[in-house]
Image (spheres, helix red, strand yellow):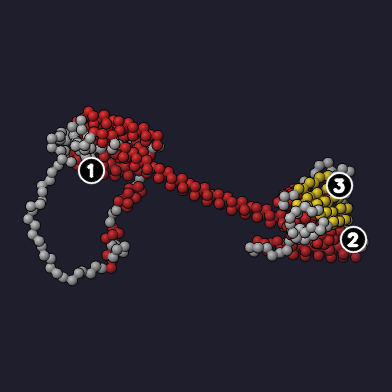
Amino acid sequence: MGREFPSRRHADVTPVVMPTSPPAVLPSSYAPGAPGSYGEGVMTFARLAARVRALPPLAADLAVVAVVGLFTASDVAVNDPGYRQDDALTWALLAVSLAALVFRRRRPVPVACVTGAACAGWALHGHIGELLNLPVIVALYTVAVLGDRRRTLWTGLVAATASGVVALIVGRDVVNPQGLPVLEMVWPLVPLLLGEVVRTRRELLAEYAARAERAEEEREREAALRVRRERVRVAREIHDILAHTVSAMTVQAGVALDALDTAPEVSRRAMTQVRASGKEAVRELRATLSVLRETESTAPAPRLDQLAELVEGVEAGGVRVALRRTPSGAAYPAVVEATAYRIVQEALTNVVKHSGAGRVAASLTGTDSALHIEIVDDGPLRSEPSTADADAAGGFGLIGMRERVLALGGTLAYGPVPGGGFRVHAVLPTEGTTGGTP
């Protein structure tokens, strides 16, 4: 400011008449947006900033120092008439400011102090210019963009106070000699505010990216959990299907082997039952595995009407089963009947595999609000509840039975009976449901 340039209002300008000719046709390669066109090669500020950010930190700092040094040196070299011209001290202060800017990322606050002291030295030395505070602006911006809000506030307070004190000592505004000294207290706050805005935006973008990453991880964990649950469900279903049938087949095969020489007819009946049980196991296994290939299962769920077939298979293995069903007149949904069937199936399987009992009493009693299931065998006396069936087949025996009951909001109790035997008792709530009857 305060500099005048020669006026060109009186310059002799002779109009030049250009010859008329058809407009030139540019090649297609000069079309806007075409490869090799002029617009593609224009270096915009956004492209320049992106390239600077892509540089290594030291190279980017040196580039910033070079740009700041170019503009500040031009102001140092040409001072307004009537003010002190550049000398060795002026250039020394410039060198100190530029050298300090190289370390602005590692030591932002000390760099701001050094550049601020150099700017104050220029003012106190009598050198006035519009671009002498450019190193301070860059340093203050760095303090805000790399720091936190508290440090930015304290830096702004100190910078505004120091700038105001220098303005009072000098008696004029360093940035604008014709302005009020109070402006000296305002300009240091501008780069700090800009840096605060940029830092806040970066933090928000980082938080959004972190949230998106956490959400993606949560989705992956949820998907993995669903896969594990589905595997457990399928394993439990396969266990419920095969454990009973295979156990019965083992017992029947043993009966056939023992009677092979002495009672061939008994052996024949036992092997016939083994073949029938094997076919039934294959059928149920195919129906269960088809669920993995279809969106919705079309295989019918087991119903209480199939308990008679289940009992026949157990009795073929040498265990007498007394089945008693007491209907309540209420209707039950398919899920209740399927769960009740699986409970009876699992309990009878445990009897065949673990208890050594010869008799089993199974009863299903329906009420208006629940279905009571009880299976009691006459096996030997046990001091503690058996966990052998839970350990077998990966733990899908009594554990799977309990999970099925709890899924319907029911209760399950099991344990040894005083005097010998084992008892399983389940209560499945059925109030307000519709379906089949026991």
Depth check: give the residue in front, 197 or 360: 197
Give the residue number, with chain letter if any, for mark 1. Answer: 70
> Dots 1 and 2: beta carbons under 8 Å?
no
The amino acid type found where label 3 is placed reads Gly
First-in-chain label (1 vs 2): 1
Under circle 2, the secondary element is: loop
Depth check: give the residue in front, 41 or 340: 340
Query: Distance of mark 3 from mark 1, alpha carbons?
Result: 98 Å
Question: Which percent across, then down, holds residue 192?
Answer: 34, 38
The residue at the point 64 percent across, 52 percent down is 228
The residue at the point 35 percent across, 45 percent down is 56
Crowd class of label 3 (few under 14; some 14 to 19; many from 20; radius 10 Å) = many
> Dots 3 and 2: beta carbons under 8 Å?
no
Question: Which percent across, then down, holds residue 323?
Answer: 86, 56
The amino acid type found where label 2 is placed reads Ala
Give the residue number, with chain letter if any, for mark 2. Answer: 259
92 sits to left or right of 333: left
310 sits to left or right of 62: right
Query: Distance of mark 1 from mark 2, alpha carbons?
Result: 108 Å
The residue at the point 75 percent across, 60 percent down is 435
Under circle 1, the secondary element is: helix
User: Residue 132 sits in which quadrant?
Assistant: top left
Q: Residue most toward the bottom?
A: 22
Give the residue number, with chain letter if any, for mark 3. Answer: 421
Camera-near label (1 vs 2) is 1
First-in-chain label (3 vs 2): 2
Q: From where the camera sits, is residue 57 visible? A: yes
Question: Which percent across, then down, holds residue 142?
Answer: 34, 39
Q: Which mark is residue 50?
A: none
